[in-house]
Image (spheres, rainbow, N blue to C red):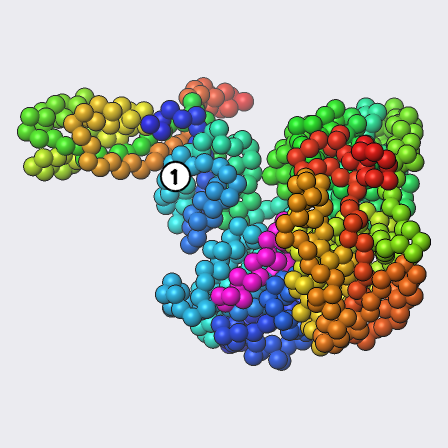
Amino acid sequence: MNGSIPHHILTVTTENKPGVLSRVAGLFSRRGFNIVSLAVSPTDDERFSRMTIVVDAESAPLEQVVKQLNKLVPVIKITEVAPTEGVERELMMITVRATADARSQVTELTAIFEARIVDVGYEAMTIMVAGEPDKLDAFSDLVKQFGIVEIQRTGRIALPKLSRQPTRLRAVKTARG
Amino acid sequence: MKLTGAQALIKSLEMEQVEVMFGLPGGAILPVYDPLIDSSIRHILVRHEQGAGHMASGYAHATGRPGVAMVTSGPAATNIVTPLCDAYMDSVPIVVITGQVPYAVIGSDAFQECDTVGITMPVTKHNWLISDAQDIPRVVREAFHVATTGRPGPVLVDLPKDVANTPMDWYWPEKVDLPGYKPNVKGHPKQIKDAARVIQEAQRPVIYAGGGILKSGASKVLRELAEVTGIPIVTTLMGRGGIPDEHPLCLGMPGMHGNYTAVTSMQRADLLIALGARFDDRVTGKVATFAPHAKVIHVDIDPAELGKVRHADVPIVGDVRSVIEELTRAVKAEHLKHERPDISQWMAQIRAWQSDYPLKYKQEEGGPLKPQYVIERLRENTPDDCILVAGVGQHQMWASQLWKFKHPNTWINSGGLGTMGYAVPASVGAKVGRPDRMVWAVDGDGCFQMTAQELVTAAAERIPVKIAILNNAYLGMVRQWQELFYEERYSEVYLSPDLPDYVKWAEAMGCVGMRVDNADDVVTTIEKANEIDDRPVVVDFRTDWREKVYPMVPAGASNDDIILGPEFGEGGR
């Protein structure tokens, strides 16, 4: 589903004030940029919030999006996480029709995807799947045959991959110098 | 010191050295109008809130200082949305204060409640809803800072009535703390060096000077750059007066109704030096065919403008005045190394275009009065530093084409938004800001009817502006498009020359009204109007409705397809 759209991921640090989300969302619609998904969360510093915005890469040049976002007064910092250089995760809760005869198949898929059953009813189960957006897409595809009652996805969040430079060697060099 | 929120607001405006504000009171802003009585700030009572916004904008254009408007909540706030959007498009620093229903009832659809901050978010540089009286001085300080620094623009402060009535401890913040707002003023030295090198290599360069020149006070340094390099300058609708029109290197206005030389020199250029300009569609025509052979040096304080419409080979973020100063220095250094490039062939080509394709119109003896003739006589019979204000439409284009601007900040008009009705209130604001200057507005009959009531304000406040209505009894620009592009099928464009009777209307509003219907009386009437200094004057010039604005690049066409007009024979190409 949304894992396959060519996209950019922006992590945007903003002031934690009322109306900031509305400014950001308004800017996107006004300038004709499309949001694929959006997640807002607090940070370790209560003055700031972090938004992870997935932008449809075909709707606008990334440079324009970043520059226009930067003009918003409450926007402090914008980092682009290129899809190859970031760790992306998303959470999905999905309620699947699972009558007695289908239940074991659904349970099996849940196990394969390392997902968790978080609620069970007489005729349906709610499953929580976390992981890369593609994995979530795959899971919902596979359970479609049983009948999907409801889906809720958080939208992806992302952090840059850590560099794996051999820090110890550098430390040795510094000590000698 | 304990003050109410309302007192703190007025005191904060005084701290920002506000001398005058334009406004109209109402329920939610009532608490603030009370301490205003004891303030040093002059308040000008408008007749419609839109007038307050445009007056603030005219004031800002004329003085370079932020214009301030104050109105109440609800309908007053929505009435001032147009001026906010207008100022946003043209980067004019205005500060608008709106009253709001009490904080406690926001969201309950209270009387005269509207989501002012929500509505104005896309048309302000930033806006604030104050929830705590203690925040007032800080927010006012931030509002003026944001409006006037970086790329200037409108801001709005929404003040709920109960917050205005709440006591607070007065303070004045020493400095502004906005971690997300740090405009970059100084151009990058390496980019500036690159730009100088590109200029050194260019054979057909043109300076494309926009409104940023006036906003940053760069007229003088622009002139120096042009003279040092010998590069000709086009001045956009918003940049007119950035260099005097009589300067030999000034080519005048480019764009949809620009003159042939300005338009074509950009088309043929191998280098465009864009200074505080934004490649507006009215300048570029069809972007794909705009200046196809030109490299671009683009200087702007707003990074988002660089590369927005046209790729910049050398993008420079910075205050245009400071960048021009550095650039001139770098160019001089290049000249010392290599000597100044010879662009005389290019200049000869430009001179040939100028003599072959000047702006043309014909005022026939005894024939109908031509609008262009009125503008040329007006220019000849007003002081060099007369401020000219225009509305939007044919009259605006003729004014911009034909007025010989001699000083910066003597031209005020609505460029980006194209707000009909801008001229009357903007001229009032300009005259308030510069009482020492003569202020003439050239207006259309359609425009005049939109905001004429602000002449009541002008008469009441003894603000002697002068309005020249070029009355052709039509929504002229729309009529022109219907004639040219809709096979002369005229749809809803006729207005009548006599309804309303502009002279009587002017008199009813406390102004002097005069009428001119032939070329012979133009100069004597202008002279008469110039002598009146105790009230506004309105002159109803009955002009030829057949006259169209030329040259013209049809919307969406390439600038190469410029139409020169009937004076140049069949087809006018």
Q: Residue at x 5, y 29 (%)?
A: A100
- Give above or below for A36 relative to B221: above
What residue is pinned by disc 1? A38
Q: Residue at x 79, y 64 (%)?
A: B540
Q: In the image, is B33 to the left or to the right of B503?
A: left
* Tag 1 secondary structure: strand
- Viewer-proximal residue among B472 and A29: B472
- Viewer-proximal residue among B264 and B199: B264
Q: Judge whether residue B198 can be spotted in this image.
A: no
Q: Judge whether residue B48 can be spotted in this image.
A: yes
The amino acid pointed to by label 1 is: Leu
Q: In the image, is B67 to the left or to the right of A118?
A: right
How many numbered callouts? 1
Q: Residue at x 19, y 36 (%)?
A: A149
**Badge 1: residue crowd in 10 Å (few <14, some 14–19, many ≥20):** some
Image coordinates for residue B102, horizontal then vertical, percent: 42, 70
Q: Magenta stretch containing residue B4, yes or no? A: no
Q: In the image, is B206 to the left or to the right of B7?
A: right
- Quadrant including the N terminus of chain A: top left
Magenta-highlighted residues = B73-95
Image coordinates for residue B105, horizontal then vertical, percent: 38, 68
- Give above or below for B201 relative to B108: above
Quarter-of-image position of residue B281:
top right
Image coordinates for residue B381, horizontal then vertical, percent: 91, 60
